[in-house]
Image (cartoon, rainbow, N blue to C red):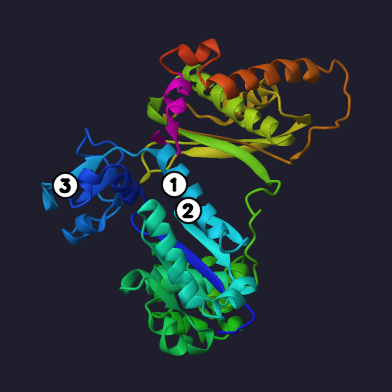
Amino acid sequence: MTRDRVVMLADCQSFYASVEKFYNHRYEQLPLVVAGDPERRSGIVLAACPLAKAKGVTTAERLGEALAKCPELVVVRPHMEEYIRMSMQISDIYRSFTDLVEPYSIDEQFMDVTGVLHLYDGDYEELALRMQQRVLLLTGIYCRFGIASNKVLAKMACDNYAKKIGSGVYVLHKAGLADTLWTLPIEKLFMTGNRMTHHFRMMGIETIGELANTPLDRLKIMMRRKLGKNSDINAEMYWRIANGEDDSPVTPETHEAVPESIGHQMTLPWDYGAIGAIKVVLLELSELVAQRCRAQGLMGSVVSIGCQGADFDRPTGFYRQEKLPYPSNATNDLYRCAYRLFERHWRGLPVRKIALGVSGLQSDEAYQLVMDDHRERYRALERATDRIKEKYGATAIMRAASLTPDGQAQDRARKIGGHYK
């Protein structure tokens, strides 16, 4: 590995389950899973501790299947607020070693330690072990570290090697890829899911090394034949990943940049087939997206709306967008446009998921005046309601429609990331 850049990817082992054991020591020696709905055997396992995994329990399987494998399994509801708090604490620990920390997910962080290696005599493995010990001591969470010369190699080092060795620390050297990464099956390549794995195998590519050693021009031709003429960018992306090429920096403020769009989607508890019920959900989504825009000091000029049914084998639905006559972050403006789009393109089929988004974002500090401009009146009203919600909670003030059986605002307020707090 080149000595002028050292990047780490730290991953928390069985994060949700580990947090539950940290706060409930009576579970420490018991097989435990965190599941979406412990009261229903059809719930999904979100995380399984190592003791549960040793019994054959796997993440994303149905809870009933997990209990059949391990009848003594402890099943806990997710506590998302605790997981977020613990994730932030772990980030702070990493920042005590280096200021270049970039969250990748709730349980994974990238770190560039190049500038602090002189404090550890250049020994990046020793540095990783110190971080590992500090996190374990303060939080009870065991972390694994993939180390390499860039982010994509560090990620694959962690996923394919660090998670499978006793120390939990693995260095993936770019110069040695032929004897390490390239020997792995193609599904072990970062960003390669089941569908892409199938496509690669249909092209005769079985290992990461076979992909890496396919000439890029040849790979583009192969992917065009298989996936269509617009696949050149994907071909180059996968080829670069297989060859361990990644120039992207570790960027602490990566999630603070102005987004290209702001949106939210809602999975409904049952099929919605009446336009009156769907209007309630559209209004709630419009309010949520508009509130997020206002919180970031942004307003958008394009509204998009999408929906789909519950049967994924026979997909139904649509996705459409429309430009607003003027940029706005007012709930009513977004709602009127979203409802107009929905009414125009909906064919009356049952709806189980609805998504609403705003793009074409710009600062809300200055905007062009229009005739009969109502935005300032809306802004004053909605700033007041935003402050009430920030101080007293999302349900402190709601629209009357949200109190009907079709409203989802109250239930959503009790959740984070789709799971109860």
Q: Secondary structure at mark 1?
A: helix
* Residue on which disc 2 sits: 90
Q: Residue furthest top?
A: 400
Compare marks 1 and 3 and give the one earlier in the sequence: 3
| Vertical side of 27 occupied by 172: above or below | below
Amino acid type indicated by mark 2 = Ile
Residue 6 falls left or right of residue 380:
left
Instruction: Give the Cα distance between marks 2 and 3.
Output: 28 Å
* Span shown in magenta: 407-421
**Would residue 399 be visible to someone looking at this image?**
yes
Q: Secondary structure at mark 2?
A: helix
* Residue on which disc 1 sits: 86
Give the residue at x 44% y 74%: 157
Crowd band around label 2 with a 10 angstrom C-alpha radius: few (<14), some (14–19), many (20+)? many
Amino acid type indicated by mark 1 = Met
Instruction: Give the Cα distance between marks 1 and 3.
Output: 24 Å
| Vertical side of 44 occupied by 414: above or below | above
Residue 52 image position (x, y, % from top left) = 20, 55
Residue 412 in magenta? yes
Q: Are marks 2 and 1 in contact (CB under 8 Å)?
A: yes
Q: Viewer-nearest of labels 1 and 3?
A: 1
Name the residue nearer the viewer: 263 or 296: 296
The N terminus: image quadrant: bottom right
